[in-house]
Image: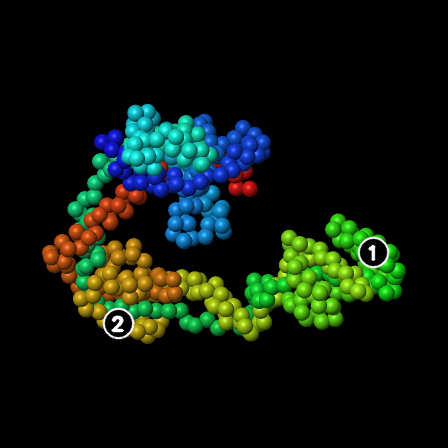
Amino acid sequence: MFTKISESKWMKFVLFITTFAFVGTAFVAIVIYKFTGNISGAAVVNGREIPLKEFYYQVNVLQNRLESQGIDTAPLKKEIYDQALEAVIDRELLFQEAEKEGLAATKEEVKKAILDAEIFKEDGKFSKERYIAILSSMDLSPQLFEEILKKDLSAKHLFTILDVSFYLSPEEINSYVNKQLSKITGKFLYIKPKDIKIPEKEIKEYYETHKKEYVGKKGKEIVVYKIDIQNTDQDKAEKLAKDLFLKLKKDIKVSGNKDINLIFEGSIYDENKLDTLPVEVRNKLKELSPDKKIIFVKTDDAYYLSKFIREVAEPLPYEKVKEEIIITLKRKYEKDQVENLYEEVKKDIDKSLKDISKKFGGKIEKIKDTTIRDIVVQYGLPTDYMNQLVKEKRGAMKLPDGVLVYIIEEISLPSKQEAEELKKLIKPILRNEKYNVLVQMYIDKLREKADIKRNSRIFR
């Protein structure tokens, strides 16, 4: 049962990730070790250290999986590192548990998995040279790769045992099918809170407080100095320019004087609007950035030096963001309004829908032979509310933007043919969902009992 590794989904996944290069972890490992004291690896699980190279291998797996889907991974570095670290911790936990249960993969299983892997073959036969070359390109030693493979195969053994003991009962399937296909006849009343009127004063106050969040045109804060060559001899002007450059580079504040004129200080959003400056200076100002903080320009009659202070953004005008602010403030108050409305409606839940509608508003809708699934879609109900609709004849549900009051007059079960057709489609999906939940609960239980120390330096 445990030797058919080459046929497993896991091995297909391994073959996919091993085609990508893995670069630069040796230097990173040395640097991190110096900063982390006792933890030189990615983490320590129950006293056993996970090597940094195993962590970066997992990072590579996640990056390549996302990039194969056309996702730019550059802005997702922290999320990828988080997932990779937790993945190698889970792998280690499962391996240690497999060892306890006597289910750890053997050397023979690891060897067979490697020999059967197409990625390591040439002309249909395993090539040791190819194997070494591929691992070398990933900066992995055969020993570490085989250790990772052993952990994954051991985890697979645990999951196989878990799968054998796993059971999806007919009652669970029938319950799901009935919830999806049972038809309801009854009345529904959807009540929304009264429209919130936000005072103009509050909107303006919010704008002033959060002005920086409403970014319009981006620009930069700069200073520009001019040293006039015509009013100063050439040698003196050149020395002044060099001294000024050094002071700006060292972040020494420079005040204008008769020799050095501070001709601009402030924020700019368009260099061409500084039309009092020569064209060549304006063009150079476009290069100022956090990476290039000082520019130096010489014209026929002057030296110009400018320094980048910081990036700035021009706030959007109040009128342009007013509606967005109103929506933000309404959302802020809506949650409390819905909660209060729900509590008030519950007090009158035994009254007729007509009376409730008169008091709170909303239109009564009559439904006949409508599936619960369609009702969930129509009113945007969370799927866990399906149970409530089936069990209760009368009640109220709190939704994000209102309250749904219902009276169920009749529930008719689906026909045998309808039920059997849905069962065929849904059984593998339900089984997979329940199995994944069970696996996660199993891992969570292992985590609760484990002593886990993470190396936080890898995120810096």
The residue at the point 56 percent across, 74 percent down is 319
Res. 413 in view: yes
Measuring from the top left, give residue 255's x and y in whole percent: 81, 58
Picture quadrant of residue 407: bottom left
Q: Give the residue at mark 2.
A: 365
Looking at the rendered structure, the kind of residue marked 2 is: Glu
Please tell me the numbered disc located at residue 238.
1
Horizontal side of residue 40 vs 239, given as left or right: left
Q: Residues within 10 Å of mark 1 (few under 14, many from 20)?
A: some
The residue at the point 25 percent across, 33 percent down is 4
Task: From the viewer's side, name the closer residue of 338 and 380.
Answer: 380
Horizontal side of residue 107 vs 200, given as left or right: left
Picture quadrant of residue 30: top right
What is the count of numbered marks?
2
Task: From the viewer's side, name the closer residue of 165 and 157.
Answer: 157
- In terms of secondary structure, where does tag 1 sit? helix
Looking at the rendered structure, the kind of residue marked 1 is: Glu
The residue at the point 41 percent across, 29 percent down is 142
Task: From the viewer's side, name the closer residue of 154 and 201.
Answer: 154
Measuring from the top left, give residue 195's x and y in whole percent: 43, 72
Q: CA distance from mark 2 to mark 1?
A: 85 Å
Measuring from the top left, give residue 201's x and y in whole percent: 57, 72
Check the image and report above or below for 211 versus 103: below
Horizontal side of residue 40 vs 67, given as left or right: right
Mark 2 or 1, nearer chain start: 1
Check the image and report above or below for 30 versus 224: above
Check the image and report above or below for 384 versus 350: above
Display colour scheme: rainbow
In the picture, which quadrant includes the N terminus? top left
